[in-house]
Amino acid sequence: MHPSYRNLISTLDFSLDEQNRLLALARRIMESPAEYGQRMGGQIMASLFFEPSTRTRLSFESAMLRLGGQVIGFSEAASSSAAKGESLSDTIRMASRYADLLVIRHPKEGAALVASQASEVPVINAGDGGREHPTQTLTDLVTIQSIKGKIEGLTVGCCGDLKYGRTVHSLVKNLSRMGVSFVFISPKELRIPGTLRAFLDEGNQRYIETHDMEEAMGHLDVLYMTRVQRERFDSEQDYIRLKDMYILDGNKLKNAKPDLCVLHPLPRVNEITPEVDDDPRAAYFEQARCGVFARMALLLMLSGVEPGLLPAERQSALPTTKAILCKNPRCITSVEPTLAHACRLHNAETRTNRCAYCEGDVQGVEV
């Protein structure tokens, strides 16, 4: 298959030049939103949310409506035919015949990739399990650029749940090509996953890992707080033990730079106290506003209304495997029995493969 459209499944799907054009478009929309009011008139966006969302779903719908388009869709799996046992691929094949673009959020890793293979229109990943959240990264980049005036050369701290936090995974991958340094602040149980660490190491990326939030604070230009996500834990006891480990309050900010930019993809639970909201360095509500402009720019470019993306390249077929199965319970293959398993050889010495959907390591297993 050689579709004429582009998708956004991973944070690295756009080249740096393409991304810079998108960020520039987002800035123009922020400055003159009325000029873009009817640019997508007559087009329909399908909002397919198999997992709860407030900011991402509403900002996408707001973005499409502000551009003059229309929105259809559902906000939970229970209100779709998935509740009747319909496969994800069938849901996508149907929805892509009703709409001009699809936005999908799903609790399983790799779901957005499956959607892109089944769809006849562009697909946007609005979050797939703990894997990636590329449009949140676009939001973050627009916000950082707007507040700091630049991205290159900054020191970015990521704090909290770095193991399951898909917003962190996408942001770190993207920023790694933009000349930043990282400070990862987390307990050992929630450190960045091995696949992300290997990605950074292969690129000779500058980063340090620490559990001491207060010691790191004074070195940061950007602090990206995250909540510990109850829904990603298999053990309730582990969640309770770790959920309050990092709480940002006014006292901790005393050690921070005066121009620190505090971000959070939201929702927050208690990892940022309400007193911080009034600190001029708190930018997370402005970040939510920037999300609308970032997604407006994305919709315009993916639909072809605005130029900036190169033509789609021929999609490579996934390396289907019958003898090697992904055992990750968070992978889309765990709930889609008819989906062909697909793995790529990662390390011949250890016979380690990598699942094409969730990117988890898989050992060869005869079936």
Image: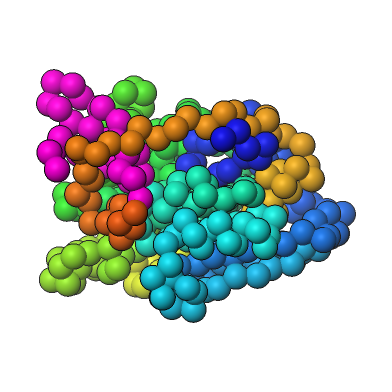
Q: Which residues are magenta?
A: 339-367
Total number of numbered discs in the rendering: 0
> Colour mode?
rainbow
Which x, y percent locates residue 73? 60, 70
Asked if residue 159 lies left or right of residue 70, the reply is left
- Residue 293 location (% of width, % of height): 68, 55
Q: Position of residue 357 (x, y in %)?
A: 36, 44
In the rendered image, which quarter contains the N terminus? Answer: top right
Residue at x 15%, y 35% (from the top left corner)? 364
Q: Residue at 30% x, 68% y: name it.
A: 231
Q: What residue is at 67 percent from the left and 63 percent from the top?
A: 98
Q: Is residue 341 magenta?
A: yes
Q: Is residue 337 left or right of residue 275?
A: left
Given residues 52 and 228, the one toward you in this image is 52
Check the picture and name the quadrant holding the C terminus. top left
- Left or right: residue 142 versus residue 131 is right
- Indicate the quadrant where residue 181 lies: top left
Judged from this view, the residue extending furthest toward the bottom is: 79
Residue 336 makes an appearance in the image: yes
Q: Is residue 33 above or below residue 61?
A: above
Foreground residue, 311 or 238? 311
Q: Is residue 103 above or below residue 311?
A: below
Q: Position of residue 39 (x, y in %)?
A: 83, 54
Q: Residue at x 18, y 21 (%)?
A: 348
